[in-house]
Amino acid sequence: MTGCYQKTIRVKRGGESTKVADPDFNDEPTVIDELMWGPVPKGQDPGAYYRKKNQPFSD
């Protein structure tokens, strides 16, 4: 499932150290997506189809 953030920022308290990292998740469709949502309709991108299905309140 996709997160709702783009960056993770970590700041050390009392210091000047700041660490920025990209989220660590994989958007590639998996077997679990196909089991949950069924096969991808013809002509649609699997990544986009399952990403939309995994969003809350999607059609």
Image: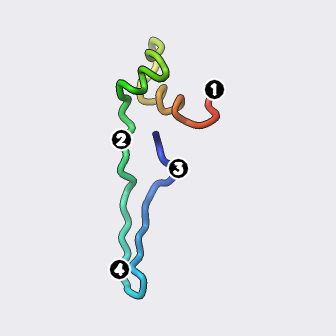
Crowding near the residue tagged with mark 3, few <14, some 14–19, many ≥20 C-alpha atoms within 10 Å: few
Quadrant of the frame with the C terminus:
top right
Secondary structure under tag 2 reads loop
Q: How far apart are the two marked residues, 3 and 4, measured between alpha carbons? A: 25 Å
The location of residue 36, given as percent across then percent down, is: 47, 23
Q: Amino acid at mark 2?
A: Asn
What numbered label is drawn on residue 4? 3
Q: Is residue 8 above or below residue 51?
A: below
The amino acid type found where label 1 is placed reads Asp
Q: For residue 23, which numbered disc appears in the image?
A: none
User: To which residue does mark 4 refer?
Assistant: 17
Please report the residue visible at 49 percent of the width from the left and 21 percent of the height from the top.
37
Residue 20: image location, x then y, percent: 38, 66
- Marks 2/1 in contact by CB < 8 Å: the verdict is no
Q: Which residue is mark 2?
A: 26
Question: Which residue is denoted by mark 1 in the rendering?
Answer: 59
Dot 3 amino acid type:
Cys
SS at badge 3: loop
Q: How far apart are the two marked residues, 4 and 1, measured between alpha carbons?
A: 43 Å
Q: Amino acid at mark 4?
A: Ser
Q: In this rendering, is residue 2 above or below 38?
A: below
Q: Residues within 10 Å of mark 2 (few under 14, many from 20)?
A: few
Q: Secondary structure at mark 4?
A: loop
Q: What distance separates the C-alpha of mark 3 from that of mark 1? A: 19 Å
> Which mark is first along the chain, 2 or 4?
4
Figure check: 19 above or below 4: below
Q: Earlier in the sequence, mark 2 or mark 1?
A: 2
Q: Position of residue 19 (x, y in %)?
A: 36, 70
